Amino acid sequence: MTTVGGQAVLEGVMMRGPSNWAVAVRKPDGDIAQVHQPIASPMARHFVFRLPVIRGVIALGESLAIGFRALAISANYAAQEEGQEGEEVVTELTRAQLIFAFAIAIGFAVLLFKVSPALITDWIGIKRTGWFVIVEGLIRVTIFVIYLSAISLFPDLRRVFQYHAAEHKAINAYEAGEELEPETVQRHSLIHPRCGTAFLLWVMVIAIFVFAFFGRPHWYWLIATRILLLPVIAGLAYELIRFAGKHQRNRILMTLLAPGLWLQRLTTRQPSLDQIEVSIRALKEVLALEGRVEADARKVEVMA
């Protein structure tokens, strides 16, 4: 079975497999537009990038890059006026615009969820290392939960959260071997162990243990460690989520990971059948593309 992940975008869903990704978007006129592209992953070229933890950093970078491109595509489709005939080929944002948006988003996230909790804890004046990293971690998680709760109140983001749930339901149905039809997919859970929301929570939890090795340094080293160690922490969190995705029937493991699953209730909302239809379209497109890749690989093997 092909491992598939995804992401909600504006009025649509992006699905990705090992070698391809596809985005499906509901246009203002009601039609569903699709765009797909191959993935040129460095993990396929160098074994070093497939090593544990390192592969998590590479996968995170790829996911962010693909996610921004998918958002750009969905934004262009969503901006079309109803009744206006648009071209089938979507013009994406320029590379400079993409890099700028990427930098702003990453900078905001690092400042809000990494630097701010460390500075707040330092300002409180906690001296002991153990208590410092624990309080810092609690502040970080609290800010994260408040942030998710606040953005969930916006109507536009509520629709994104519905598509987020539609993505989860489609993947759950596929992994259960169910037929990919809207009514069937709707019966499945809107929670998934490999969700990015759970990943972010475990990044914050793992950070507590990693930062414990560095104690309570001066404020400039405090900020530096929170930024420079982020790839290592993300790589460890990726391995945990990846392991959980392969052992979903392990009750002990699922109990330990339950907080990450509960948190998804803030970033998912029950989708409509129309929204699930969009998610299924993206998933089927990726599965078809991955099937062609596997078929081509078998042909090469036979010819060799």
Image (cartoon, helix red, strand yellow):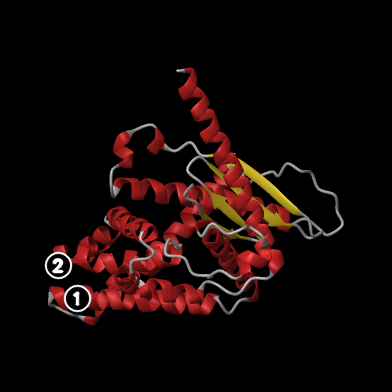
Instruction: Report the disc number at residue 290.
Output: none
Tag count in the figure? 2
The type of residue carrying mark 2 is: Gly
Seen from the viewer's position, the closer of residues 215 and 50 is: 50
Seen from the viewer's position, the closer of residues 269 and 304 is: 304
Residue 233: x %, y % from top left: 29, 58
- Viewport quadrant of the C terminus: top left
The local secondary structure at tag 1 comes to helix
Q: Could you tell whether 237 is left or right of 68 in the image? A: left
User: Which of marks 1 and 2 precedes in the sequence?
Assistant: 1
Residue 236 in the image: above or below residue 190 = above
Q: Residue at x 79, y 44 (%)?
A: 87
Q: Which residue is mark 1?
A: 132
Q: Residue at x 35, y 49 (%)?
A: 57
Seen from the viewer's position, the closer of residues 35 and 170 is: 170
Report if the CB atoms under discs 2 and 1 are less than 8 Å apart. yes
Query: How many residues crowd mark 2 within 10 Å: few (<14), some (14–19), many (20+)?
Result: some
Residue 278 in the image: above or below residue 165 = above
Taking the view exactly as shown, the residue that stands out farthest to the right is: 83
Residue 137: x %, y % from top left: 28, 74
Q: CA distance from mark 2 to mark 1?
A: 8 Å
Q: Quadrant of residue 188?
A: bottom right
Q: Quadrant of residue 228?
A: bottom left
Instruction: Report the disc number at residue 215.
Output: 2
Q: Could you tell whether 175 is left or right of 238 in the image? A: right
Residue 224: x %, y % from top left: 26, 58
The local secondary structure at tag 2 comes to loop
The type of residue carrying mark 1 is: Phe
Query: How many residues crowd mark 1 within 10 Å: few (<14), some (14–19), many (20+)?
Result: many
Residue 276: x %, y % from top left: 65, 63
Q: Residue at x 46, y 24 (%)?
A: 301
Q: Quadrant of residue 71?
A: bottom right
